[in-house]
Amino acid sequence: MPLCVESPSPPERGRGQVRGRRFFRAQIGSPSYNRRMTNYLNDVEELAAQVPDGALLALPPEYSFVPMALVRAIIRRGVKDLHILTVPINGLAADMLIGAGCVKTVECAAVSLGEAGPASRFGAAVESGSVKIIDSTCPAIHTALQATEKGVPFMPLGGIIGSDILRYRDDWKVVDDPMGEGHGRIVLIPAISPDVAIIHSPLADRDGNVWIGRRRELATIAHAAKTLLVTVEKIQDESLLASEATAAATLPGFYVTALAQAEMGAKPLGLVEHYAPDHDEIAAYARESRTEEGFNAYLQRTVFGAQEAAE
Amino acid sequence: MSYSRDEFLITTIARLLETDDVRHVAVGAASPIPGAAALLARKVRGGMPRVSLIHGKATNPFCDGGREIFDAAGQGRIDVFFLGGVQIDGQANLNLVGTGEYPTVDKRFSGSFGSAFMYFTVPKVILFRPEHSRRVFVPKVDFISAPGVSDPDVHRPGGPKFLVTELCVMSFDRDRGRFKLESVTPGRTVEEVLDNTGFEIDVPETVAETPAPEEERLALLRSSVGVEVADTYPAFAKDVLGVEVAA
């Protein structure tokens, strides 16, 4: 039984600011921020119900604990107008959400299926203008989340000057080194606080603590997000904080809004030391998603068909 | 000894990693040829440089999340990194975003990844693009993911040093913002390079031939180094180097 299922409420907005960006301190620290115990939900459908339309949704990178079962549930729920942020890159999850019509804006350093080839639904949507593209670069996305981690409104980052990425980012500012140390011009990246972040993990305990191994970007995402939804392969009784070895690789439960078990929850992507990526399945997706018709057939078979089989 | 195009590119890149200033080589995602070159250079040099393959397991030293490779580069701890481009122009500007007018480009590619930072911070960036054509080597890129050169008031310890293609090796002079032809692949010609390059380059009076893979290095590549390559790139090690490792 779920302990508590809240109906999704739209995230708070700062005074006239872009949702999820400025006034992040007030938002994370506001009464709406969930300081209660982690909610243990029954399944991915209940987790997906926590993702409101229009949310700024952070996705982990392809190699790191991507909650594909939850992504499929979000598609089934028909969530609209998402602003997805890839941290810092993504592939299958972003491409499927875009192809399924869940996405209004893509903010990314790259969207690619890696060795399986290009992310075709992403490419088609950007070329046709059906999604808004906000190009970034990997360290800028990390930096924007780190600014939120530290509770500061922006953070400087080297490089970038002279790129067209900067030219099209009117939210990034260039200043002369304010310390007068002769560093020259430097870019300021505004903080980003995702409304919702989603991750998968091999293991959680009963206190909402989640094992993330050395994938520390998951901690950064969690620290910066207002709501964190987690799927796990397994829930164990013993606390992950009981041993220093597991504690060092653990995300504490006070960052975790809600959690549900989802075995094989990263499939067809891999989960380190648990299962390898299903390269045949990923290649099949890459092939079928080249056309909209092929993508829709894939979605019927693997997303909507899966639900029917479960019911 | 006969060799494949990929083996030739690996030994060509490895030679650029055999100088004392190369202490730590980092290799990004899905880059088996640069990765194999770095592992070969390490074997030839007896343990130097350090090689960090970000998608490896034991060969991936990064334990502080996705940001660590960029932070390490910003600290000056990475000497060599590899970048490519959908388009590259004569000023070494890179385009990884798309062709045509931004943002609704004619053909969208994956995105800039970390290029806009690594190009500024890593002292010896090697541009690697096997396809040598006027489609790739254009007069001016349609979108600058990362600029080849910067104004003097921009802090920039890093930048492009070499370009390796299937036809040639070029060096890049950052002060002049120009490529110079260093050597041409055996069996190919300077004319062929110029015909397939959409920008002006400096061509010395005599241009050397890029050495063919040395026999002992090919042997290493197809044995002990190949096993190391297989740890991160099993399909590549099997198909290109003929090295199969039991899972």
Image: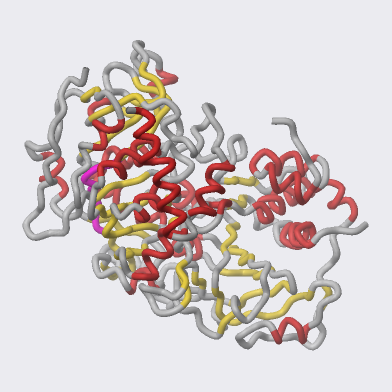
Say if the magenta span includes residue A196.
yes
Residue B237 visible in the current orientation: yes
Q: What secondary structure predominates along the stretch shown in magenta?
A: loop
Left or right of A194? Residue A69 is right
Residue A88 visible in the current orientation: no
Q: Position of residue A98 (x, y in %)?
A: 35, 55
Q: Tell which of A147 and A299 is nearer to you.
A: A299
Q: Position of residue B101 (x, y in %)?
A: 40, 79
Which region of the structure is painted magenta? A190-197
Residue at 34% across / 37% down in the picture? A70
Q: Is residue A263 above or below residue A186?
A: above
Quadrant of res A306: top left
Q: Position of residue B209 (x, y in %)?
A: 83, 74
Residue at 9% across / 40% down in the picture? A30
Say if the magenta span includes residue B104.
no
Left or right of B107? Residue A219 is left
Residue most extreme to the top: A237
Q: Tell which of A251 and B2 is nearer to you.
A: B2
Left or right of B229? Residue A300 is left
Residue most extreme to the right: B1
* Screen quadrant of the C terminus of chain B: top right
Q: How is the image coloured?
A: secondary structure
Residue at 55% across / 85% down in the picture? B139
Q: Position of residue A206 (x, y in %)?
A: 29, 16
* Screen quadrant of the N terminus of chain B: bottom right
